[in-house]
Amino acid sequence: MATVISERRMTVKVVDSKPSICTDTDSLHDLISMLDIALNESPDDPDLLVVRASAHILLNNSDQANHDLNHALQINPKHIEAFNMLQYAGEWNHLLFLPPWSSQSNLIHPVLAENANQGEVLQSVRHSLQTALIILFTVTKHDWPDSPTRYRWEAVCNRTPFGPIGAHYILLERNGQTHRQECLILSPQIESPAPHSSPPALLTRLSSAKTCFIILADQQGEVLHNLRYDLPMTLRSTLKKISHQLLKAIGTNSSENQKAANWHMEHFDMNQLSL
Protein backbone atom coordinates (compact mmCIF):
# COMPACT_ATOMS: atom_id res chain seq x y z
CA MET A 1 0.00 0.00 0.00
CA ALA A 2 2.86 2.41 0.77
CA THR A 3 4.24 1.81 -2.72
CA VAL A 4 0.83 2.61 -4.25
CA ILE A 5 0.58 5.88 -2.30
CA SER A 6 4.08 6.95 -3.29
CA GLU A 7 3.41 6.22 -6.96
CA ARG A 8 -0.17 7.47 -7.39
CA ARG A 9 -0.32 10.41 -5.02
CA MET A 10 3.14 11.87 -5.56
CA THR A 11 4.24 13.28 -8.89
CA VAL A 12 7.92 13.79 -9.61
CA LYS A 13 8.77 16.62 -12.03
CA VAL A 14 11.80 18.62 -13.09
CA VAL A 15 11.52 22.31 -12.21
CA ASP A 16 14.41 24.64 -13.08
CA SER A 17 16.64 21.61 -13.76
CA LYS A 18 15.94 20.17 -10.30
CA PRO A 19 13.60 17.34 -9.26
CA SER A 20 10.42 18.42 -7.51
CA ILE A 21 7.60 16.50 -5.81
CA CYS A 22 3.95 17.48 -6.22
CA THR A 23 1.88 16.06 -3.36
CA ASP A 24 -0.12 17.13 -0.31
CA THR A 25 0.08 16.66 3.44
CA ASP A 26 -2.75 14.11 3.49
CA SER A 27 -0.87 11.86 1.09
CA LEU A 28 2.31 12.16 3.12
CA HIS A 29 0.50 11.36 6.36
CA ASP A 30 -1.17 8.37 4.70
CA LEU A 31 2.23 7.18 3.49
CA ILE A 32 3.65 7.47 7.00
CA SER A 33 0.67 5.56 8.42
CA MET A 34 1.24 2.70 5.97
CA LEU A 35 4.95 2.68 6.82
CA ASP A 36 4.14 2.64 10.55
CA ILE A 37 2.14 -0.56 9.98
CA ALA A 38 4.94 -2.14 7.94
CA LEU A 39 7.54 -1.18 10.55
CA ASN A 40 5.45 -2.68 13.34
CA GLU A 41 5.98 -6.00 11.56
CA SER A 42 9.59 -5.30 10.47
CA PRO A 43 10.97 -2.72 12.91
CA ASP A 44 14.56 -3.16 11.76
CA ASP A 45 14.04 -2.73 8.03
CA PRO A 46 16.41 0.15 7.09
CA ASP A 47 14.75 0.75 3.72
CA LEU A 48 11.33 1.31 5.31
CA LEU A 49 12.90 3.61 7.89
CA VAL A 50 14.56 5.67 5.17
CA VAL A 51 11.32 6.08 3.22
CA ARG A 52 9.48 7.15 6.36
CA ALA A 53 12.27 9.63 7.06
CA SER A 54 11.88 10.97 3.50
CA ALA A 55 8.17 11.59 4.11
CA HIS A 56 8.92 13.29 7.41
CA ILE A 57 11.44 15.56 5.68
CA LEU A 58 8.78 16.66 3.20
CA LEU A 59 6.58 17.52 6.20
CA ASN A 60 9.50 19.37 7.86
CA ASN A 61 9.52 16.87 10.73
CA SER A 62 13.30 16.88 11.06
CA ASP A 63 13.45 15.26 14.50
CA GLN A 64 11.38 12.25 13.44
CA ALA A 65 13.35 11.99 10.20
CA ASN A 66 16.71 12.03 11.98
CA HIS A 67 15.50 9.42 14.46
CA ASP A 68 14.57 7.04 11.63
CA LEU A 69 17.83 7.71 9.77
CA ASN A 70 19.98 7.08 12.83
CA HIS A 71 18.05 3.88 13.50
CA ALA A 72 18.62 2.77 9.88
CA LEU A 73 22.37 3.40 10.23
CA GLN A 74 22.51 1.44 13.48
CA ILE A 75 21.08 -1.52 11.56
CA ASN A 76 23.17 -0.95 8.43
CA PRO A 77 26.07 1.51 8.91
CA LYS A 78 26.73 1.46 5.14
CA HIS A 79 23.20 2.35 4.04
CA ILE A 80 23.82 4.85 1.22
CA GLU A 81 20.52 6.72 1.43
CA ALA A 82 20.45 7.04 5.22
CA PHE A 83 24.07 8.23 5.40
CA ASN A 84 23.71 10.88 2.69
CA MET A 85 20.37 12.13 3.97
CA LEU A 86 21.89 12.71 7.41
CA GLN A 87 25.19 14.04 6.10
CA TYR A 88 23.85 16.45 3.48
CA ALA A 89 20.23 17.06 4.54
CA GLY A 90 18.42 18.98 1.77
CA GLU A 91 21.38 18.72 -0.60
CA TRP A 92 20.66 15.02 -1.16
CA ASN A 93 17.62 14.23 -3.32
CA HIS A 94 16.12 11.37 -1.32
CA LEU A 95 14.27 8.34 -2.62
CA LEU A 96 10.89 10.03 -3.11
CA PHE A 97 12.46 12.44 -5.60
CA LEU A 98 13.26 9.52 -7.94
CA PRO A 99 10.76 8.64 -10.69
CA PRO A 100 8.86 5.40 -9.93
CA TRP A 101 9.39 2.26 -12.02
CA SER A 102 8.22 -1.34 -11.97
CA SER A 103 8.08 -4.41 -14.20
CA GLN A 104 4.60 -3.27 -15.27
CA SER A 105 5.61 0.26 -16.34
CA ASN A 106 4.69 0.79 -19.99
CA LEU A 107 5.45 4.48 -20.54
CA ILE A 108 8.73 6.30 -20.00
CA HIS A 109 8.40 8.72 -17.08
CA PRO A 110 8.80 12.36 -18.22
CA VAL A 111 11.79 12.86 -15.90
CA LEU A 112 13.53 9.82 -17.39
CA ALA A 113 12.76 11.06 -20.91
CA GLU A 114 14.12 14.52 -20.19
CA ASN A 115 17.32 13.11 -18.71
CA ALA A 116 17.70 10.69 -21.64
CA ASN A 117 17.41 13.60 -24.06
CA GLN A 118 20.43 15.08 -22.30
CA GLY A 119 22.40 11.88 -22.88
CA GLU A 120 21.78 10.13 -19.54
CA VAL A 121 21.28 6.51 -20.57
CA LEU A 122 21.83 5.13 -17.06
CA GLN A 123 19.58 6.61 -14.36
CA SER A 124 18.28 5.96 -10.85
CA VAL A 125 14.61 5.10 -10.22
CA ARG A 126 12.39 4.22 -7.27
CA HIS A 127 11.31 0.57 -7.33
CA SER A 128 9.20 -0.87 -4.50
CA LEU A 129 10.45 1.86 -2.15
CA GLN A 130 14.09 1.06 -2.96
CA THR A 131 16.63 2.54 -5.34
CA ALA A 132 17.13 0.71 -8.62
CA LEU A 133 18.85 1.50 -11.92
CA ILE A 134 17.40 1.84 -15.40
CA ILE A 135 19.14 1.69 -18.77
CA LEU A 136 17.09 3.21 -21.56
CA PHE A 137 17.45 2.47 -25.28
CA THR A 138 15.38 3.99 -28.06
CA VAL A 139 14.48 1.34 -30.66
CA THR A 140 11.72 0.60 -33.16
CA LYS A 141 9.08 -2.10 -32.96
CA HIS A 142 10.17 -3.20 -36.41
CA ASP A 143 13.70 -3.92 -35.15
CA TRP A 144 12.57 -5.47 -31.85
CA PRO A 145 9.11 -7.01 -32.35
CA ASP A 146 9.83 -9.69 -29.75
CA SER A 147 11.48 -9.56 -26.36
CA PRO A 148 15.12 -10.67 -26.21
CA THR A 149 15.38 -14.34 -25.29
CA ARG A 150 18.35 -13.63 -23.04
CA TYR A 151 19.98 -10.44 -21.78
CA ARG A 152 22.78 -9.27 -19.55
CA TRP A 153 24.34 -6.06 -18.26
CA GLU A 154 28.10 -6.00 -17.94
CA ALA A 155 30.27 -3.26 -16.46
CA VAL A 156 34.03 -2.77 -16.58
CA CYS A 157 36.12 -0.68 -14.19
CA ASN A 158 39.26 0.34 -16.07
CA ARG A 159 42.12 2.29 -14.50
CA THR A 160 43.62 3.70 -17.69
CA PRO A 161 46.93 5.64 -17.91
CA PHE A 162 44.80 8.81 -17.94
CA GLY A 163 42.52 7.97 -15.04
CA PRO A 164 39.62 5.66 -14.15
CA ILE A 165 36.49 5.12 -16.21
CA GLY A 166 33.48 2.85 -15.97
CA ALA A 167 32.21 1.24 -19.17
CA HIS A 168 28.78 -0.38 -19.44
CA TYR A 169 27.60 -2.90 -22.01
CA ILE A 170 24.24 -4.50 -22.71
CA LEU A 171 24.05 -7.93 -24.34
CA LEU A 172 20.74 -8.91 -25.95
CA GLU A 173 20.03 -12.22 -27.68
CA ARG A 174 17.64 -12.33 -30.61
CA ASN A 175 17.17 -15.18 -33.08
CA GLY A 176 20.20 -16.94 -31.64
CA GLN A 177 22.47 -13.93 -32.21
CA THR A 178 24.00 -11.74 -29.52
CA HIS A 179 23.71 -7.98 -29.97
CA ARG A 180 26.20 -5.93 -27.96
CA GLN A 181 25.54 -2.32 -27.03
CA GLU A 182 28.14 -0.03 -25.48
CA CYS A 183 25.65 2.08 -23.58
CA LEU A 184 27.74 4.41 -21.48
CA ILE A 185 31.18 5.57 -20.47
CA LEU A 186 31.18 6.95 -16.92
CA SER A 187 33.95 9.41 -16.08
CA PRO A 188 34.81 11.36 -12.93
CA GLN A 189 32.89 14.58 -12.40
CA ILE A 190 34.89 17.51 -13.76
CA GLU A 191 33.87 20.13 -11.20
CA SER A 192 35.04 19.64 -7.65
CA PRO A 193 32.02 19.90 -5.33
CA ALA A 194 31.70 22.86 -3.00
CA PRO A 195 32.48 22.18 0.67
CA HIS A 196 29.71 20.26 2.42
CA SER A 197 27.82 19.62 -0.85
CA SER A 198 26.53 16.14 -1.63
CA PRO A 199 28.43 13.80 -3.99
CA PRO A 200 27.08 12.88 -7.46
CA ALA A 201 23.95 10.86 -6.74
CA LEU A 202 24.16 8.32 -9.57
CA LEU A 203 27.80 7.42 -8.90
CA THR A 204 27.07 7.13 -5.19
CA ARG A 205 24.01 4.92 -5.70
CA LEU A 206 25.91 2.58 -8.02
CA SER A 207 27.59 1.02 -5.01
CA SER A 208 24.31 -0.18 -3.48
CA ALA A 209 22.30 -1.13 -6.57
CA LYS A 210 20.71 -4.59 -6.57
CA THR A 211 18.26 -4.33 -9.47
CA CYS A 212 18.39 -2.87 -12.95
CA PHE A 213 15.76 -2.49 -15.68
CA ILE A 214 16.87 -2.67 -19.29
CA ILE A 215 14.27 -0.75 -21.28
CA LEU A 216 13.69 -0.82 -25.03
CA ALA A 217 11.27 2.00 -25.88
CA ASP A 218 10.18 3.82 -29.02
CA GLN A 219 10.62 7.54 -29.71
CA GLN A 220 7.16 8.31 -28.34
CA GLY A 221 8.10 6.84 -24.96
CA GLU A 222 6.11 3.63 -25.24
CA VAL A 223 7.93 0.75 -23.57
CA LEU A 224 8.34 -2.16 -25.98
CA HIS A 225 10.31 -4.45 -23.67
CA ASN A 226 10.79 -3.99 -19.93
CA LEU A 227 13.53 -6.36 -18.79
CA ARG A 228 14.25 -6.71 -15.08
CA TYR A 229 17.80 -7.77 -14.28
CA ASP A 230 18.73 -8.69 -10.71
CA LEU A 231 22.41 -7.90 -10.45
CA PRO A 232 24.75 -10.83 -9.75
CA MET A 233 27.32 -10.36 -7.00
CA THR A 234 30.18 -10.06 -9.52
CA LEU A 235 28.49 -7.10 -11.21
CA ARG A 236 27.58 -5.49 -7.90
CA SER A 237 31.24 -5.74 -6.89
CA THR A 238 32.31 -4.07 -10.15
CA LEU A 239 29.78 -1.26 -9.69
CA LYS A 240 31.17 -0.62 -6.20
CA LYS A 241 34.68 -0.34 -7.68
CA ILE A 242 33.47 2.07 -10.35
CA SER A 243 31.69 4.18 -7.73
CA HIS A 244 34.75 4.25 -5.45
CA GLN A 245 37.26 5.03 -8.20
CA LEU A 246 35.22 7.76 -9.90
CA LEU A 247 34.20 9.48 -6.67
CA LYS A 248 37.84 9.51 -5.59
CA ALA A 249 38.86 11.09 -8.92
CA ILE A 250 36.32 13.95 -8.86
CA GLY A 251 37.86 17.10 -10.34
CA THR A 252 39.72 15.34 -13.16
CA ASN A 253 40.33 17.53 -16.22
CA SER A 254 37.79 16.95 -19.01
CA SER A 255 40.53 16.35 -21.58
CA GLU A 256 42.00 13.61 -19.36
CA ASN A 257 38.57 12.03 -19.07
CA GLN A 258 38.28 11.98 -22.85
CA LYS A 259 41.74 10.46 -23.21
CA ALA A 260 40.81 7.78 -20.67
CA ALA A 261 37.60 6.96 -22.54
CA ASN A 262 39.42 6.81 -25.88
CA TRP A 263 42.16 4.60 -24.40
CA HIS A 264 39.57 2.17 -23.06
CA MET A 265 37.68 1.97 -26.36
CA GLU A 266 40.94 1.34 -28.25
CA HIS A 267 42.10 -1.41 -25.88
CA PHE A 268 38.90 -3.19 -24.89
CA ASP A 269 37.20 -5.65 -27.23
CA MET A 270 33.54 -5.93 -26.25
CA ASN A 271 33.22 -9.02 -28.46
CA GLN A 272 34.87 -10.90 -25.60
CA LEU A 273 31.65 -10.41 -23.61
CA SER A 274 29.15 -13.23 -23.96
CA LEU A 275 25.85 -14.39 -22.56
Image (tube, helix red, strand yellow):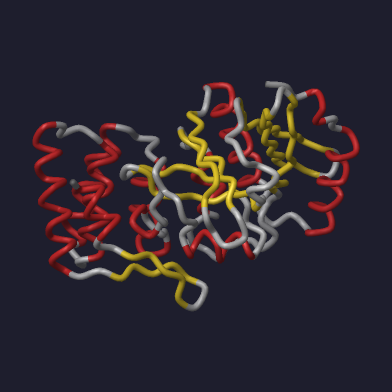
Horizontal arrangement in the rendering, residue 234 relative to residue 5 (left or right): right
Q: Quadrant of residue 161?
A: top right
Please tell me which residue is depicted at 17% across the width and 63% down the height of the picture: 27
* Count of marks overlaid on the render: 0
Horizontal arrangement in the rendering, residue 105 relative to residue 73 (left or right): right
Q: Nearer the viewer, residue 106 or 186?
A: 106
Please tell me which residue is depicted at 26% across the width and 32% down the height of the picture: 75
Please tell me which residue is depicted at 73% across the width and 39% down the height of the picture: 181
Residue 6, how many percent across, how many down? Answer: 26, 55
Furthest residue to the bottom?
A: 16
Please tell me which residue is depicted at 86% across the width and 49% down the height of the picture: 259
Q: Is residue 22 above or below residue 264?
A: below
Residue 215, how many percent across, how many down? Answer: 56, 45
Q: Is residue 11 above or below residue 225?
A: below
Q: Quadrant of residue 178?
A: top right
Residue 24, how many percent across, how many down? Answer: 20, 70
Q: Nearer the viewer, residue 250 or 108?
A: 108
Residue 117, how many percent across, how many down? Answer: 63, 64
Q: Nearer the viewer, residue 99 or 29?
A: 99
Give the quadrant of the C terminus. top right
Q: Is residue 51 above or below residue 230?
A: below
Horizontal arrangement in the rendering, residue 220 relative to residue 198 (left or right): right
